[in-house]
Each structure stands twice: as C-alpha cells, then as structure tokens.
C-alpha cells in the first residue's frame, strides 16, 4: 500500500480545529493596460485588433416620425470614409435597436473588415444624444462597454477607442472611464479550479483611448491611474462580500485590515482591539453579538493621515462588519445563504481605505472603523430579553437577536465620536430588509437630520453612480424603541423598521455632529453577478471632499 500524500486545498480555508486566518485578494489587471493618445490617426494606422467608435445620436424632434440618418463627424467620419461607409451602413441596418447611439453604453453588432490574412473588428458605441450633457453615468457606461467588448470579442490583444470631442478628455472624464473599465473586468476565481476559472479579456494587452482634441499626457496618465486606484477599492469590496464564512471571519477580516495598512506606504495605521480591550471600554453591545462565535470579536480601526500632516477635517466612517449573520436565537427563516454579505458596509469602508491611501488624499484625517464579529448560536450566545450596556452607558433590551448590526455599530459610533473625536461621521450597513422593501435593490437609504450632509451625499451619489435616496427620520417612531426595563430596545415593530434602525443609532453620536446612517442592504448584492462593490466610491468621494479647504 503506497503512502498517501498530504492534501493541499486550492485556497486557504479553515481546518476542523482552526478557523481561517487569511482571505486572498483577487489579482487585478495591469495598470498599464489603459492609455491615452491624442493622435486620431493611430486608429487607422496602427494594427489594432478592435476599434470602438463612440458616437452621439443627433437630437430628435419628438414630433417628427422620420427616421434620422446617421451623421458621423470628425475622426469617425474620416474612418467611415476609409472603410467605404461600413460604419454608416451598420448604423442604418441596426437603427431600431441602436438608434444611432441614443442610449449610452449601447453597441452595434461587430463589423469585420478583412485586410489580406488579418481581420479587424469595429464596434460603434452609443454615447447618448448630442443635445444632452455628458454625465458621470454615461462615462461609467462607456468604460464598462469597452471592457465588455474586449472580453466578448475573443482573441483581441489591442483595442482603440475613438472618443468624440463632446465626450472630452478632462481628468474626471478619463478617471470615470478608467474606474468602470477596470471594475468591469473583475472576476472572482479564488474558489474555482480547472476549467471553471474565468479569465476576463484573457489576451488583451493594450487599450488606447483616443479623444479628439488636445490631451495633456501627464495629466491624462494621472487621471487613468486614479481610476485604477478606485477600481482596486471596488475589487476589495467585492472580494470581502463574496468571501464565504469558512474563509472570512473576524480574524481574517482583521488581517485584511493589517494588509491594507501594510501596503499604504505608511499613510494608514492599523489598530486591532481584542475582547479584553473592548471590555475595558465598556463595549458590551458589540461583545454581546460576538459571544456565540468560534472566533473572538475584533474591533478594527484604520487611521489615515495625509503625507504633509495638514488636516482640514477629521472624519469617521463606520462599516457594519458582521461576517455571517444567522440571526442568533431569533434565527433567520429566509436568505440565510446570503448572510455572508452582512459585512457589506465594512467591505465598502475597507475598499475606500485602500483607494484613499493609493490616491494619497490631502487635507483629511479619516478613521475607518469596523466592529467585526459573527452572529451565531451556542451556549454563550446572547438571547432575546437580555439587557446589555453600550460604551456610552446606555442600557439596551435585546428584543430581537437578528437586529444585531446596530448593536455592534453602537459601540463603534461611540468610539468614533468620543475616543477619536471625529467631526463628521457616516456609517454604512446592510441593516434592514425594510429598506430593501422601500427602495428595492438599486438604492441605498440615507438617514440623517443634517440637510447639508444629506445634500452632499445626494450629489456624491450622482457623480459616483452609488445611488441613494434620503429617507425620513420620524421622531415619533422613537416610541417603538421604548423599553419597560431598560433605556431603549434594539428594534421596534415591523412597520418603519428602516427608520427605527436609524433612530436607534442616533443615540450613540453627539446630536450636534453631522451624522448619516446609510442602509446599503439592497445595492450591495446582485443575484446575477454577486457582490457589486457598492459604497467604496461613495465613501472615497465623501472623504476627498472633506479634505477640501473651505474659504
């Protein structure tokens, strides 16, 4: 009988006796994949496998029923002429579906032009109509469509993207295209083997953006690099949400934070508080939730400070970090298999921390805080009717162990407010199914008493594509949180559950400080593709704006 070899698992995971201590990260594409050229002649002269031609549709009179003729202009018109009108022809043939590019992100069928033994491919990419301003949403669609085309068209090694002058070449334009391009190429293969591994745009080595008009090379390169950094935050956000609980627990989450700090070039300092340090601070609300877990709770604090030390604002960003939520003794009867996504807030916070350190944002000191634990069931786990004490001294009656996220974040908010002294605080969490019922899966709910903060987050949602909607904080609903034996209950009735969750959290932040609770339960996950990366861009942009010096 031959001696058996020790089995090596294809990824790092738990053993029978020990929890997993490390979560691997998805390997990103090369940052040199995307570049910019101001020479439109390269589209015709260089040997690209694929050419994508961006076009705006002419403005259409609503009262006119006539079919508009394709109207190519500039470099696109010159290219069409050199191809014997092939671009115009495909536009006319596909008018009903493509409408000359009236819908941003739409594409025509691929045109194949044979030149000797080589085939060159052309695709027309819709950019919307000429009479409308180019918004960030359009640019995100452009970047995603380019990435998808490079992936769908097999064996493409090189691609050129012709961008009309209206689209522009401003740094913000290039950054938005870059971030969405790289984000679209994300593929989580960490838990796949053999032919199940999916590599996006496998043969691609070069994509050149070719804007019409002048381009400042150094500025353009920096803009593309910024977009790449943003995409890396989105990658990490997706990795955390996608990771199963046998890989991602409070310990491996803490080690993920340590890795972010280690790779920050000294801009981020990582502090992990264990259970003893949390108990000294009176974090009974957080620790109650983690009592039933195999791994001890880890209170994670990433502190970012700019290189020059000049600080205009000190801000706190809290992310809900429940690595798996069974519901506790109020055990879940639905969606249990998705409860690995209950760390979506923490994922967004970590993703933003990674991006912010890569961008080396100035003028802001940012504190990223995650109270990491699992909500499990055993003989130590907390139960309904327990009365626990938060670190601000407030006593809380546990009405439902499945309203656990707010309990972990209560102590995180007190820490950000009192111990760190953050001036402005936002918190992201996959907190309530009630918010999903109200807003669906495409929007986060923003709960704040501060109008300026609400307006700022609304604008940031528009420019980042992380969509949100302001929700009410009806003060009369506080009556639902009244307890017969404690200061407060941890949840109210089934009606207005998203609102009472926000009202509960307000008890742990100074009333005078700008504070927003952002419920991301809906948009953090897609049934079709898995983790969406939602929240990382929103947090990054909020922190960036806080660093701007106000005159």
Image: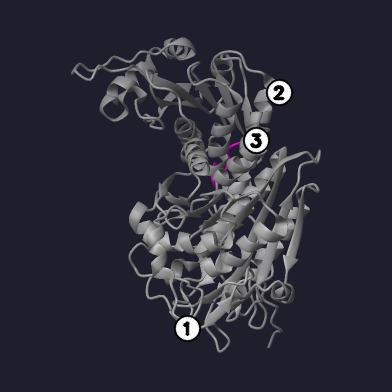
Question: Where's residue 464, x and y in %?
Answer: 52, 39
The vertical placement of 3 against 341, above or below, is below
Q: Earlier in the sequence, mark 3 or mark 2?
A: 2
The vertical placement of 210 against 378, above or below, is above
Q: Which residue is drawn at 40% across and 54% down?
A: 528
Name the element at disc 1: loop
Residue 343 is at least partly visible in this image: yes
The quadrant the C terminus occupies is top right
Residue nearer the viewer, 498 or 3: 498
User: What's the CA distance linking mark 3 and mark 2?
Assistant: 12 Å
The vertical placement of 38 against 439, above or below, is above
* Residue of label 3: 226
* Residue of label 2: 218
Q: Which of marks 1 and 3 is nearer the N terminus?
A: 3
The magenta segment is 199-205
Which mark is drawn over residue 385? 1
Which image quadrant for residue 248? bottom right
Which image quadrant for residue 7? bottom right
Name the element at disc 2: helix
Residue nearer the viewer, 523 or 452: 452
The quadrant the N terminus occupies is bottom right
Q: Left of 146 or right of it: where is 472?
A: left
Which image quadrant for residue 230? top right
The vertical placement of 158 against 355, above or below, is above
User: What's the CA distance linking mark 2 and mark 1?
Assistant: 62 Å
Secondary structure mainly formed by the magenta segment:
loop
């Amino acid at each position: 009988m031959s001696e058996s070899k020790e089995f090596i698992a294809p990824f790092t995971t738990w053993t029978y006796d020990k929890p997993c201590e490390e979560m691997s990260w998805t390997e990103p594409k090369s940052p040199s994949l995307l570049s910019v050229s101001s020479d439109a002649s390269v589209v015709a002269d260089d040997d690209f496998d694929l050419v994508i031609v961006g076009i705006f549709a002419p403005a259409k009179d609503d009262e006119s029923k006539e079919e508009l003729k394709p109207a190519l202009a500039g470099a696109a018109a010159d290219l069409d002429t050199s191809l014997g009108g092939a671009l115009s022809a495909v536009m006319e043939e596909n008018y009903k579906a493509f409408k000359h590019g009236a819908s941003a992100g739409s594409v025509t069928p691929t045109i194949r032009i044979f030149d000797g033994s080589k085939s060159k491919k052309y695709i027309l990419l819709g950019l919307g109509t000429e009479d409308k301003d180019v918004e960030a949403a359009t640019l995100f669609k452009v970047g995603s469509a380019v990435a998808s085309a490079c992936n769908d068209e097999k064996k493409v090694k090189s691609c050129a993207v012709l961008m009309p002058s209206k689209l522009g070449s401003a740094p913000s334009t290039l950054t938005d295209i870059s971030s969405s391009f790289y984000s679209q190429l994300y593929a989580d293969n960490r838990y796949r083997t053999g032919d199940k591994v999916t590599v996006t745009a496998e043969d691609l080595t070069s994509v050149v953006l070719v804007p019409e008009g002048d381009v400042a090379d150094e500025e353009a390169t920096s803009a593309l690099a910024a977009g790449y950094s943003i995409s890396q935050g989105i990658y990490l956000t997706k990795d955390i949400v996608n990771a199963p609980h046998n890989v991602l627990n409070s310990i491996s989450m803490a080690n993920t934070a340590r890795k972010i700090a280690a790779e920050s070039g000294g801009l981020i300092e990582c502090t992990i508080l264990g259970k003893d340090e949390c108990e000294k601070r009176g974090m009974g609300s957080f620790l109650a939730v983690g009592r039933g877990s195999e791994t001890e709770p880890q209170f994670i604090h990433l502190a970012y400070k700019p290189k020059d030390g000049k600080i205009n604002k000190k801000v706190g960003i809290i992310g809900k970090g429940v690595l798996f939520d069974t519901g506790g003794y109020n055990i879940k009867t639905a969606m249990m298999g998705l409860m690995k996504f209950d760390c979506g807030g923490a994922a967004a916070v970590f993703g933003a921390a990674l991006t912010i350190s890569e961008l080396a944002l100035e003028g802001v000191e940012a504190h990223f805080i995650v109270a990491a634990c699992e909500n499990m069931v055993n003989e130590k786990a907390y139960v309904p009717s327990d009365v626990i004490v938060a670190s601000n001294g407030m006593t809380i009656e546990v009405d439902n162990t499945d309203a656990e996220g707010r309990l972990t974040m209560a102590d995180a908010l007190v820490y950000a407010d009192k111990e760190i002294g953050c001036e402005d605080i936002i918190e992201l969490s996959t907190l309530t199914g009630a918010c999903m019922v109200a807003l669906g899966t495409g929007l986060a709910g923003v709960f704040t008493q501060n109008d300026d903060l609400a307006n700022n987050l609304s604008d940031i949602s528009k420019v980042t594509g992380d969509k949100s909607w302001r929700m009410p904080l009806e003060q009369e609903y506080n009556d639902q949180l009244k307890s017969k034996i404690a200061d407060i209950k941890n949840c109210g009735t089934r009606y207005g559950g998203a609102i009472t969750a926000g009202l509960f959290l307000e008890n742990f932040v100074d009333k005078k400080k700008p504070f927003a609770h952002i419920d991301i339960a809906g948009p953090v996950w897609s049934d079709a593709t898995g983790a969406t990366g939602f929240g990382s861009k929103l947090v990054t942009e909020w922190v960036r704006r806080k660093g701007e010096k106000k005159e």
